[in-house]
Image (cartoon, rainbow, N blue to C red):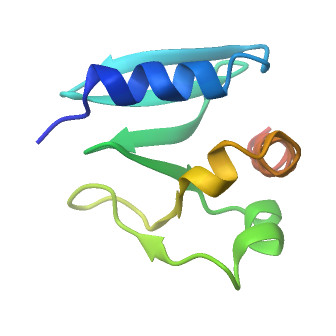
Amino acid sequence: MSSSKWYIEYLSDCLIWLTGIRFKYMFWEYAIYKDNVVIWLICDDIFFIKITTGTKEILWENYQTWIPYPKAKPQFQLDESIIEDQELLRNIIEACRNDLK
């Protein structure tokens, strides 16, 4: 199964306030780049963010890890409550981006 265009449009609308965001279609799914670094994956209409030291500090006790596709590393799955909370999402993005520099 692949991600729907509707879900990608929804995420694009939720992330419109961010600068340096780019969606890239790959293998029927999407990678989302922040300042040319892959931070998120969209697989089967599920929003995943990489597990880093910073994202663990913010999400570890509240979110389960999932494997977005076979042989992938576990990642945090973000639900709509986080996607639509700009302040929390900004903190998660900044933590992940800083860890991946």
* Residue 61 relative to residue 86: left or right: left
Pick the front one: 58 or 88? 88
Seen in the picture, residue 14 relative to 12 is either above or below; the reply is below
Taking the image as shown, residue 69 lies to the left or right of residue 13, namely left
| Quarter where residue 44 is shown | top left
State the image quarter where residue 1 is shown: top left
Query: Residue at the location (20% across, 60% down)?
Result: 70
Measuring 19% from the left and 28% from the top, which residue is drawn there?
A: 27
Q: Position of residue 79 (x, y in %)?
A: 54, 57
Instruction: Find residue 23 and report its horizontal and vertical position in percent.
Output: 48, 17
Up-down relation of residue 42 to residue 69 (above or below): above
Q: Position of residue 10 (x, y in %)?
A: 48, 26
Residue at 37 percent across and 30 percent down: it is 7
State the image quarter where residue 25 is shown. top left
Residue 9 image position (x, y, % from top left): 44, 19
| Depth check, front residue: 72 or 65 | 65
Q: Nearer the viewer, residue 49 or 87?
A: 87
